[in-house]
Amino acid sequence: TELDRIRNFSIVAHIDHGKSTLADRLIQLTGTVAQRDMKEQILDSMDIERERGITIKANTVRIDYPAKDGKTYVLNLIDTPGHVDFAYEVSRSMRAVEGSLLVVDASQGVEAQTLANVYQAIDAGHEIVPVLNKIDLPAAEPERVKEQIEDVIGLDAHDAVLISAKSGLGIPEVLEAIVTRLPAPKGDRNAPLKAMLVDSWYDPYLGVVVMIRVMDGVIRKGDRIKMMQTGAIYGVDKLAVLKPQMVDIEELGPGEIGIWTGSIKQVRDTRVGDTITTEKKGCETPLPGFKPAQPVVFCGLFPVDANDFEDLRDAIEKLQLNDASFSSEMETSAALGFGFRCGFLGLLHLEVIRDRLEREYDLDLITTAPSVVYKIFLRDGTMQELHNPADMPDLTHVDHIEEPRIKATIMVPDEYLGDVLKLCQDRRGVQLNLTYAGNRAMVEYDLPLNEVVFDFYDRLKSITKGYASFDYQLTGYAEDYLVKMSILVNDEPVDALSMMVHRDRAEMRGRAMVEKLKDLIPRHMFKIPIQAAIGGRVIARETLSAMRKDVTAKCYGGDATRKRKLLDKQKAGKKKMRQFGKVEIPQAAFISALKMD
Ligand code: GTP
């Protein structure tokens, strides 16, 4: 395809502003997918994505569009995830395209993720077409939102395209704007092959599938290809474009986006951001590199039933084939037995992976307290990274501890601002900036990541009735007074519940934990002390009193089926319990105990 007939673009938007619906309409209106095959959110292929309505992995579709000028254009849409945890995937797919549609819900206006994503597009040098969606809603205020886009983002929005992705209104205008307002890609067909590895995933039939964007030169079926970072050589067995199903193609030239396969065994062998060239007469300099996604949140995953350990190992390996950003390492816990210490890009990533393990692989799991990566500086001058509070070295060896900090951007209607500031303050935040756009405030905070990983987002949503939006980026490490808090149940430490906390907040967290555990742990035949401690010092304590004998008396006599039902329930519940010394703790306790109110 000639360069001037190609347009490559992505859609950036805040969650729920209608990115997927717009993509569906573009695909539909151009007849890319036959009407009978059309289903909602066609680009979100994973079940979980569909159910939760969030986009996780970047997906791509090639659309043939006959424009008003009489020529047919090839439009490549790279769909990007909207959530903060996947910011890295956004940035890499941005570099593969020249333009973006900025979708803003005309009834909501600019939100935190609109900003985060649009800045990535600006950084990638994109031409940007603002699109105001949901103008069918009575609450839509396109003129006000145009102003806001100009004030807050600094983009010219006077000729924003007004659409309703739901009804289809304005979609032809979007297609024309893509052709007339976004730039064509540049590239030299006669130069040596230079292509960017945009994404890769594992397909059970094809093996590793690699998505590329060709910058210069041509890639053909049968070529011998070199990955410049690793030096690995592969043949091109299959070359295809995504419409969105694979359609084989003989060659891909400059500006084009497609996939190839070549008996690559592991997703790990394909580094996103790597430059691909031909084995012979290849290009000399690679494209500027990307930094790989680093896991920032760690937690332990243990099977409820120790016999499921091998199944868990298999399931984790399978998921890793498709997700190189999810790391794991075997871990043993005194209380929980054998499991894995896993690393994630953020909390949502953690939840998605845990969900998939439980649902797709039918596993019952115990998740330990999520922890960020601390830097422990020892007296002997060395530094070690701490992924698991259980591995905290003896305090006498520790000089100081540093923790990761973030810059958080929160957008919120005026009336909730006070509560938001209080929440950030309570979480050890330092205010950096506060500005207004209309009656919405935009506030920036420097916060410890540790205070955000548990339930910050949930709390923020609940105190603002869902009106706040939130986004963050890691900024670096800083020293603070951090300690390891242990939880003891019946005098036995439960390592899965130990966590790193700020010294000033330890009593509060400790008290909240033991109070919760007291409600969550069922009574036993004996008294159970529940304690929070720092080192040897107890900072909070509750006692769960013993069960009174006559409580069980109710179980005798009465309706037999009811009794059986109760017994079945008990059995099912039992499966979700873990034995700690003489005490049984339900799985739900681990999760609930870690949520703060
Ligand atoms: P993520 O995939 O989570 O990033 O969300 P998204 O931006 O793709 O949003 P999505 O397309 O899933 O739309 C979110 C909700 O808004 C859905 O319930 C849509 O039906 C609705 N919606 C999308 N476009 C319109 C529109 O033009 N008008 C109205 N009234 N609702 C719309």
Image (cartoon, rainbow, N blue to C red):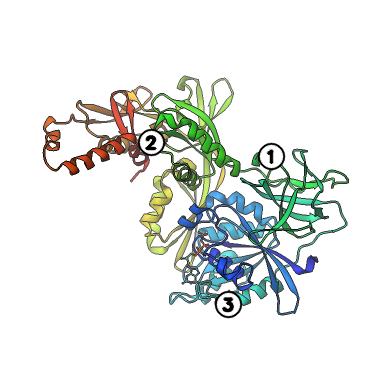
Q: Could you say where residue 494 lies in the image, as x and y percent from the top left?
A: 36, 28
Taking depth in this image into account, of 429 and 191 the one nearest to the observer is 191
Q: Could you say where residue 243 lies in the image, as x and y percent from the top left?
A: 66, 62
* Residue highlighted by disc 1: 269
Residue 151 can be seen in this image: no
Residue 262 can be seen in this image: yes
Q: Could you say where residue 113 lies in the image, as x and y percent from the top left?
A: 53, 58
Q: Tell me which amino acid carries mark 2.
A: Asp
3 and 1 marks in contact (CB < 8 Å): no
Nearest to the eye among marks 3 and 1: give it: 1
Q: Reply above or below: 334 against 237.
A: above
Q: Tell me which amino acid carries mark 1.
A: Asp
Nearest to the eye among marks 2 and 1: give it: 1
The residues tagged by marks 3 and 1 sit, at their Cα atoms, a distance apart of 43 Å
Looking at marks 2 and 1 on the same chain, the residue that comes earlier in the sequence is marked by: 1
Q: Residues within 10 Å of mark 3 (few under 14, many from 20)?
A: some
Q: Secondary structure at mark 3?
A: loop
Residue 170's disc number: 3
Q: Quadrant of residue 74?
A: bottom right
Looking at marks 2 and 3 on the same chain, the residue that comes earlier in the sequence is marked by: 3
Please, which residue is most extreme toward the front here? Answer: 560
Nearest to the eye among marks 2 and 3: give it: 3
Q: Residues within 10 Å of mark 1 (few under 14, many from 20)?
A: some
Q: Tell me which amino acid carries mark 3.
A: Gly
Residue 189's disc number: none
Q: Residue at x 74, y 73 (%)?
A: 72
The quarter in which the N terminus is drawn is bottom right
* Residue highlighted by disc 2: 504
Q: Could you say where residue 206 lies in the image, as x and y percent from the top left?
A: 66, 47
Q: Quadrant of residue 119?
A: bottom right
Whether the residue under disc 3 has CB within 8 Å of ligand 1? no
